[in-house]
Each structure stands twice: as structure tokens, then as C-alpha cells.
Image (cartoon, rainbow, N blue to C red):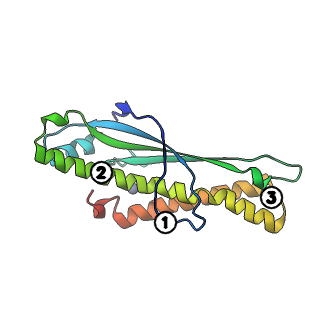
Amino acid sequence: MRLAACLAGSLLLALSGEGSVSGERCPIELTFVHYPVAGLTLEQIKQSMRANGPVEPDGTRRYARTDWKIQWIWDKTDVGVDPSTVRIVCKATVTLPEHDSPQTMSQAELGRWTEYRARLKMHELNHVRHVEVVAPKISREIGRQSAQQGQLSARAAQKIAKEVIREIHGLDRSYDRSTRHGATEGI
Ligand SMILES: [Zn+2]
């Protein structure tokens, strides 16, 4: 896999959109990684993407992918977790193709490619949005359950965090299932 030809810096992403009951968002520390592709037409570039695209853990090669990570931290008290100190950090890396010599393409093909790549990017950013919208549930749920039951043990709080992670993975899977990894979105 020829990855990381160029690395864009991290940036804070403020995605718009609905989905969170509380409206709370986890700011995403977003990094773009590009892998090079070549070709004079969109079809040729797709061939290049099929040869050079990122590989999933199960070995499937994709045109693009999003890796994300959520970290959580809290202060401990004698009893357990202080719910007012729960902090979450959300990071994502989006891997996308980048044409190595777009100036060689005709205007028409360059236009097709640019549009196609924008759709690809949008699909990946929807995965990022799952994290942005759902991750705050970790602190929210710990706060809610602490209010009901008194302070939670670290173990109980960890369990909540892991359930939220599973929920986001589930959203990613159902989004890919319903769009057939973007096929229904023109990818
Ligand atoms: Zn996807």
C-alpha cells in the first residue's frame, strides 16, 4: 500500500447536521492522508484506486477509509469516577486518493474526477460525523447514571464508554450496508 504521499495537517472540524439529542458534539481532530492515483479518465483512476487504495483489517481494498479513535479520561474519587471531570478526545484519519498529475487530464475528465472525489470525501466525513455526534454520549451517560445511582466505579464507566464505541461501529456498519460502501451515493 502506497500511503501517506502527502499529509494534510490536523484541523478542527465543525460538521453541521442533526442527529444528537443534546446538540453536543465532540470536536474532531481530523487528519487527511492521501494515496497517489494516476489515469487520464475516471475509469482509469478507479483502476488505480483498486490497485492502491487502503486495505481494511479483513484484507478488502477500498477507495477510501476512515479510522477513528475516542479517548476518555476522568478524575477518580475514593468511590469511583467524578462525573464532572469526564473528558473525551475524538480523532479521525480519512484516507483519500489524490491524482498525481491532474494537469494531464482533459477538462471534462478532471471535472468528473473532482466531483467523484468530493462524493468519496463526503461519504468518509459521514463516518466522522457518527463519532462527532455520538461520542459525547460517554460523558452524558456517565453523568446520568451517576446522578441516578451515585458515583460509578471506573469499571462501570469503562463499560459505558465501550458500549458507545460499539454503537458507533454499528452505525458505521449500517451506513456502509445501506449505501453499499457508497455505491448508492455515486461512488
Ligand atoms: Zn463507508
Q: Could you tell me residue 6's position as x and y percent?
A: 36, 31
Between 7 and 27, the one lying in front of the other is 27
Q: Which mark is residue 152?
A: 3
The amino acid on which the numbered mark 1 sits, given as a three-letter code, is Glu
The amino acid on which the numbered mark 2 sits, given as a three-letter code, is Ala
Residues under numbered marks 3 and 2 in contact, where contact means CB atoms less than 8 Å apart: no
Q: Which residue position holds label 1? A: 18
Please state which of the two labelled residues, at mark 2 or mark 1, is closer to the viewer: 1
Q: Which residue position holds label 2? A: 118
Taking the spot 19% from the left edge, 37% from the top edge, the residue there is: 102
Above or below, comparing residue 111 to residue 146 in the picture = above
Looking at the rendering, the quadrant in which ligand 1 lies is: bottom left
Direction top: furthest residue: 5
Above or below, comparing residue 135 to residue 148 in the picture = above
93 with respect to 164 (left or right):
left
Taking the spot 40% from the left edge, 35% from the top edge, the residue there is: 8
Taking the spot 18% from the left edge, 50% from the top edge, the residue there is: 112
139 with respect to 119 (left or right):
right
Mark 3 and mark 2 lie on one chain; the one further toward the N terminus is 2
Q: Is residue 11 visible?
A: yes
Q: Is disc 2 placed on a helix, strand or loop?
A: helix
Q: Could you tell me residue 44's position as x and y percent?
A: 16, 44
Please state which of the two labelled residues, at mark 3 or mark 1, is closer to the viewer: 1
Residues under numbered marks 3 and 1 in contact, where contact means CB atoms less than 8 Å apart: no
Q: Is disc 1 placed on a helix, strand or loop?
A: loop
Mark 2 closeness class: few <14, some 14–19, many ≥20 residues within 10 Å:
few
Quarter of the image where one finds residue 98: top left
What is the distance, in whole Å, between disc 3 and disc 2 at their CAs? 44 Å
